[in-house]
Image (tube, rainbow, N blue to C red):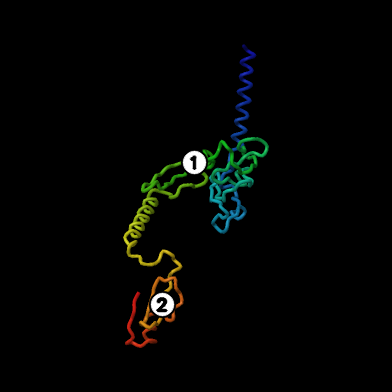
Amino acid sequence: MMMTMSGKVLVLSWVLLILARTLAAHECTPCGLRTCPSKHAHGAHGAQCEGGRSSVRDPCGCCDQCARLEWEPCGGQDWVLGYCALGLTCASFNRTGAAVLPEIGVCKVLPDHLEAGLVDERCPLMTGCDRAGAECVCDARHSCLGSFSFPDQESCMKASKTEGRRHEHRERHRERFVGPSNPACMFSGCNLTAEGCVCESHSCHHHFSYINRSQCHEAAGFNTPDVRE
């Protein structure tokens, strides 16, 4: 019995040691002691990210970066090499599954993590709102990707009202629009014929002799009959 108890104690001690090392490996350097990597190194143009990248906050909560894309390096101490875009996991080079920091990994799709990045308990708690039809649905979740459409309910409701007014305006004036369905057919002008000045607007025909009715009248004389179409 004593041997069995000693074995359990040794196993427990070994597990606690591994856990302590793992937690130490995940401990981030305080933000005040860090220098954030330049966004330019991750494909940014000015303050914006380009090339299909979204802006992310690293899991340490210190630095704004541009998300890393598939097959690009990621992780490292304090996530210095970056955080992966939505749906991608920072995977280990030497084994299956996700990389364990400060390990350096590569961003790729893992079958068991298809919604990677949407919720990540390592990331800061973020709040925001999304539109669901005419409603604003607000929530809080741990995420580095800032995937909410609106930062708060007020901005979401304001956008909903603005979109509602735009829709109402389009519906109210839909029947008043008399132009052609083809936006290229926007030519206007007049031609002088035996019947007088023939003028058109919103026409696909662009061979007009005069740019407006006044110029056509001047060329034809004021007593020439006027023909409208």
Q: Is residue 209 visible?
A: yes
Question: Which residue position holds label 2?
Answer: 189
Question: Under tag 2, what secondary structure?
Answer: strand
How many residues crowd around disc 1 within 10 Å: few (fewer than 14), some, or many (20 or more)? some
Q: Quadrant of the C terminus?
A: bottom left
Q: In this view of the protein, which residue sits in the foreground, 52 or 20? A: 52
The residue positioned 52% from the left and 46% from the top of the image is: 145
What is the number of the mark on residue 142? 1
User: What's the residue type where badge 2 is placed?
Assistant: Gly
- Amino acid bearing label 1: His
Does residue 135 appear left or right of residue 29 in this picture? left
The N terminus - image quarter: top right
- The percent coordinates of residue 110 (x first, y second) are 59, 39
Q: Residue furthest top?
A: 1
**Towards the viewer: 199 or 157:** 199
* Residue 151 pos. (x, y %): 43, 49
